[in-house]
Amino acid sequence: MARDSTETRRRILEAAYREFARHGLAGARVDRIAAAAQANKRAIYDYFGNKQQLFDVVVVDRLVAGITLVPQSWDDLPQYGADVLDYYAADPDRVHALNGIIIRLLRARKAGERRFEIWGSGRPVREWVYVDDAARVLVESLEGGPQVDPVNIAQKQGHSIAEIAALAAKVLGYEVELVFNTRYPDGAPSKILDDRRFREKFPHFRFMPIEDGISRTIDYYRSVS
């Protein structure tokens, strides 16, 4: 019985991890977790309490896994930090949509697949910023002195999930059919930030073009795969 309980708990944690990664805490559903784990909802509440408590356990479980699986190098902490980042970044379930699509596209191309599944309709629009741009903004913000009010790192420009998937495939030179699995929910139809205050504070800042950012992100994932 103890063995069965341990196995059920493990399946619940794995299913919950993927559910939270795809839908967030607010969008995650306990019934989907139970179905994916081949367990009943009552078992989830018995083992973990409520959805928030299950989320907390999943976060701690994944953090411990990362610390345990990544070789520790206390003599070179910057490298250890980079290794931890690479560990988390290499799993499409741990990253945001664009990164996850790139990781899965790379794997699909390597496997010679001719169809590529996208979760949802592909219509939701999201705003993307390349990590180097975000870092530049932070540096310039520090150099500009103290500030109290928050400022969006924003372009007020977005691309749909379908657009960025097609663009990533184009950059890869990968001729593949995009298939949209509408059994997965889309989430909010649009997430684009207002850039008025950003432009007031950084009037001359220029963001990297989306295609260049995708190309560099592809190069990064190739380097860590």
Image (cartoon, grey):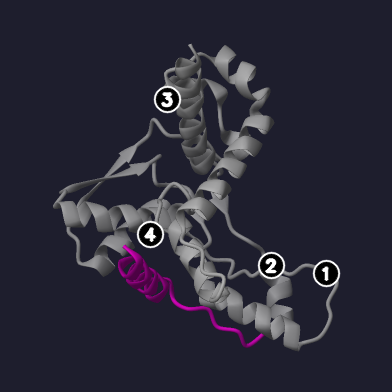
User: Quadrant of the image for the C terminus?
Assistant: bottom left
Q: x and y percent of residue 57 in the render?
A: 62, 36
Question: Circle 4 sits on which residue?
Answer: 164
Dot 3 alpha-carbon crowd within 10 angstroms: few under 14, some 14 to 19, many 20 or more: some
Q: Earlier in the sequence, mark 3 or mark 2?
A: 3
Dot 4 alpha-carbon crowd within 10 angstroms: few under 14, some 14 to 19, many 20 or more: many
Question: Circle 2 sits on which residue?
Answer: 152
Q: Is residue 161 above or below residue 221?
A: above
| C-alpha gap between disc 3 and disc 2 | 37 Å
| C-alpha gap between disc 3 and disc 4 | 28 Å
Q: Nearer the viewer, residue 111 or 86?
A: 86
Q: Nearer the viewer, mark 1 or mark 3?
A: 3
Question: What is the three-letter code of the residue carrying label 3?
Answer: Ala
Residue at 15 percent across and 49 percent down: it is: 114
Question: Circle 1 sits on which residue?
Answer: 149
Q: x and y percent of residue 80 in the render?
A: 52, 69
Residue at 48 percent across and 29 percent down: it is: 10
Kind of element beneath mark 4: helix
Q: Nearer the viewer, mark 3 or mark 2?
A: 3
- How would you classify the magenta stretch by its main secondary structure? helix
Residue at 51 percent across and 43 percent down: it is: 21
Residue at 83 percent across and 69 percent down: it is: 149
